[in-house]
Amino acid sequence: MKKLCIFGMVFLVFLGSCATSIPVTVTKPAIMNMRGIEKIAVVPFTIAYERSAGNYIDLIAAVFSKSASYNTVLEQQTAQALTGAVTDAILGTRAYTMIDSGMLSRLDQSQYATVVDAYMIGEVTLLKITDSDYSEPVKNADGTTGFKMMRRRIADLEFTYRLIRAADGSIISQIKKTGTCKDVSPDGRALRDEFDMVKEIISDELEYLNRDIAPWTIIEYRTLESEKPKSPNMKEAAALVKQRSYIQARDRFITIYEETGSFAAGYNAALVTEIAGDLQGGMERMAALSSATGNPKAAQELARMKRTQAEIDALLAEQEYARR
């Protein structure tokens, strides 16, 4: 069964703080809707220059009937590299069981759901290597301008991949990637290997594939609001935040806000309430502050808190589904 790990006090891990900002590690839900998916197969990528990238059923038929062909070694290397990179990215999440796509080749499409929950399929829609010569002006020792010959290589790669739900053949998500890699050779130096350039594009374009398919973490910052001149009480409350005494800091900010009506104190009280592990309480305080002051900064932070709550709800729902 797919395992879903949620980090820290629900989703926040405190990493320390500087004078005005508190870094927190936040777990984000997968960008794709991966509900109910535990077993995935990666169908080998194909080359599809001359047809639409939309008919994935034809692509599967081509792969499994061995009719997929390559005009060059580079095409074959690129398709294999993409297949391997996608497979490695899925394995790297440790959230799914990988199934050999060869098992699908022995089945009718209506039977795929007996072995996998979803399968990834893709194709290369553009692969082009362009070499060219050009001259570049240089200043000679005697002050005159000369020219030296240069060689340039440009690798262009475009590919599409989509995740298909095996139960009904619906497309969960379809993503198109385009990348370019360039190399320039002065003084007759050999240009970079074509396949090395293509592999660099693949690595760059698939760097965040794990975020598409599995929960991922990122460091965000919660920045305290400051006021000028800063009162001794505000300095004391901020010092408590730096000491990670969040409950005491929250109470101090609340007292300052109630006594002075300081927007910064009210804002910080709501923010530290969230950091202390009470996101709902933080939203309530920020909503009240926004209503009382009309300050757009409070409204913006409230919207951010609501997005965070929605992400938490999505992760909890996925965790609950995975337990069934």
Image (cartoon, helix red, strand yellow):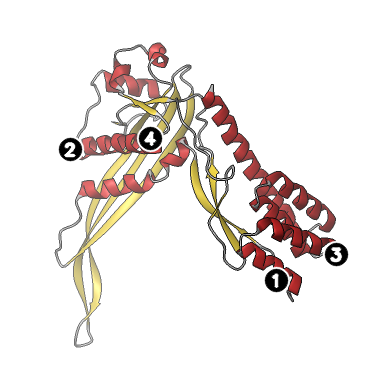
- Of the numbered discs 4 and 2, the one sitting upstream in the chain is 2
The local crowd at label 1, few if under 14, some if 14 to 19, many if 20 or more residues have their Cα within 10 Å, is few
Q: Secondary structure at mark 3?
A: helix
Find the distance from the CA under tag 1 to the CA under tag 2: 66 Å
Q: Which mark is residue 8?
A: none
Residue at the image point whose x is 37% and y is 38% from the top: 92
Find the distance from the CA under tag 4 to the CA under tag 3: 54 Å
- Of the numbered discs 4 and 1, the one sitting upstream in the chain is 4
Kindly identify which residue carries mark 4: 90
Find the distance from the CA under tag 4 to the CA under tag 1: 47 Å
Q: Which mark is residue 235?
A: 1
Kindly identify which residue carries mark 2: 73
Looking at the rendered structure, the kind of residue marked 2 is Val
- Camera-nearest label, 4 or 1: 1
Contact? badges 1 and 2 (CB < 8 Å) = no
Residue at the image point whose x is 77% and y is 51% from the top: 285
Kindly identify which residue carries mark 3: 259
Image quarter of residue 80: top left
Q: Nearer the viewer, residue 105 or 22?
A: 22
Looking at the rendered structure, the kind of residue marked 3 is Glu
